[in-house]
Amino acid sequence: MIIVKAAICAEREATVPPVPWVPVEVAPAIVCSAMSPMLCRERPSRPSSALRTCSGVPASTDTVMASRSTEVMPEKWSGRSMVSTGAEMPVKLWPVPTIFTVPRCATAPSISRTICPVESGATILRGSAVSVPAQFVHGAMGSRVVTLGAITRLTPMFSSTGPDVSPYDALLLLSFGGPEKPADVVPFPENVTRGRGIPRERLEEVGEHYFLFGGRSPINDQNRALLAAIREDLAGSGIDLPVYWGNRNWDPYLVDTLTQMREDGITRAAVLTTSAYSSYSSCRQYRENLADAVAAVEGAPRLDRLRQYFNHPGFVEPVVDATTAGLAELPDNVRERAELVFVTHSIPTEMAETSGPDGDGYVRQHLSVAAEVTSRVRQETGRHHGHDTVFCSRSGSPRTPWLEPDVNDHLATLAKAGARAVVLVPVGFVSDHMEVIYDLDTEALATAEKLGLEAIRVATPGVDPRFVAMVRDLLVERAAAERDEPVERAAVGDMVARPEVCAVGCCPNPRGERPALCGLDA
């Protein structure tokens, strides 16, 4: 049960615009009325039909209308909602209500009356309209005084009760980036391919893909959703850690994010990249970008990249469930013999051959995950499905060999061999960005239709709670390793978990050596 508590944030006469209301299920609760002579009193809540909760609040500091608090079932609580059981008054919502115990009440320093008339040992909430010196709060790290209208409130700050993530004081989400509007479409691929000799015709072709979707990539919105989900997951697990976001190739640029982190006093951060596999493009190039950004920002925090997670259960299990769900959506008469087509981003064959510490890591990792997913699907459905790993999004010089077969060519091969249905599994991608919504949803599905194949493309992990929880697991795992504590690294399939620090020579730059962080050769 989570208690959501209102706190006075303005004088009684203040007014604010109304907000939308939706029903919510509630249970008997401690109800606190800021207008009552006794600040807090125990009483059962009203039936759920008589209660309302405000929704759609864009930020924890926004003023909304409500007057009391009650317990809200966790599955009904959005993270910043409030139940109203009486007359309206301005309140401020707190993003993660933290329950703590006050040994005794205290008097606010700037007024003569006690505003915490609760019994010794009573349970109240972070953000409630009471004055509690920090030394009276169990586990407190400090306090701050907040003046709201005629009332001064002392808001205790708390030490974390969740997993230990020291020595880290922040988490950085590092992604690829993408255009946000039509004017960004040409500059973006130029940023990505600068110095790589990609033909202008290919850049224009890629630009046309974005224009089909309003000149905007979905990746930034997906990263915003993942960022919010990670923050909510960490807070819900008792981990008080700021989470930042930076991109390699577009706003918010990594240099700007590191500058903000420095200004915020961050000294050491763990880094999660939105790429699960090992290769130059999906691993070392991120490390090179980290080195460039740190060199450009004086006083930048120390950065430790979290390990590649292609075989972490939090990545694999959502893929298994999505594949099983995709099969279930196919017509009955073709489902049993449907082929599973695992799709990932093609890379130059030379890059693939040198990927990972021992070479061929990129392909072997994908084959391992595809085999594990296929095996798990068989266990769940009782049927064996043929499967292959294929590629999409070739973008290099036509003279340079890239990994094959292309997904469209493979679909033609399957149709010629008598296949009637396929399930496209974008196993190489963590979310539905352009390579998924264009190369698969647009091109590959059109190819399947032309060939007479029943086809469905299944979901990527995205913000699946297991994938989000994986981020926390990797963070806690790496923190423990940095404290020289024993660590069990979760992994499924026939390959072991990747180490936190890349080996010397791992995933080399095909154009020559460049500085890179987070490796033994850093």
Image (cartoon, grey):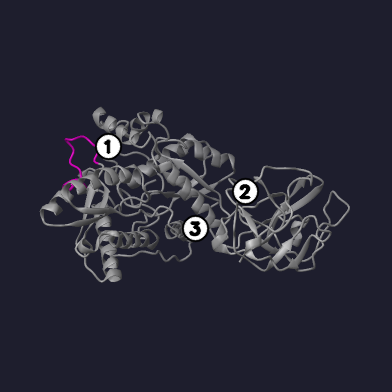
Q: Quadrant of the C terminus?
A: top left
Corner quadrant of residue 18:
top right
Q: Residue 243 bears which disc, if any?
A: none
Q: List x then y, in percent, for residue 347.
A: 25, 44
Q: Which residue is mark 2?
A: 60
SS under mark 3: helix
Query: What separation in Å lies between label 2 and label 3 (alpha carbons)?
Result: 29 Å
Q: Residue 511 bears which disc, if any?
A: 1
Dot 1 surroundings within 10 Å: few (below 14), some, or many (20 or more)? few
Q: Is residue 502 shown left or right of residue 448? A: right
Corner quadrant of residue 13:
top right
For the point 23% across and 37% down, which residue is it?
396
For the point 80% across and 55% down, which residue is it?
35
Tell me where the magenta segment starts and ends, as one range.
Answer: 394-409
Q: Quadrant of the N terminus?
A: bottom right
505 or 441: nearer the eye?
Answer: 441
475 or 392: nearer the eye?
Answer: 392
SS under mark 2: loop
Q: Earlier in the sequence, mark 1 or mark 3?
A: 3
Query: What separation in Å lies between label 1 and label 3 (alpha carbons)?
Result: 33 Å
Dot 3 surroundings within 10 Å: few (below 14), some, or many (20 or more)? many
Residue, far right: 112
Q: Is residue 119 above or below residue 296?
A: below
For the point 21% across and 48% down, which residue is it?
449
Query: What separation in Å lies between label 1 and label 2 (alpha carbons)?
Result: 47 Å
Q: Is residue 47 above or below residue 365?
A: below
**Residue type pointed to by label 2:** Ser
SS under mark 1: loop
**Residue type pointed to by label 1:** Arg
* Residue 163 in view, yes or no: no
Q: Residue 479 bears which disc, if any?
A: 3
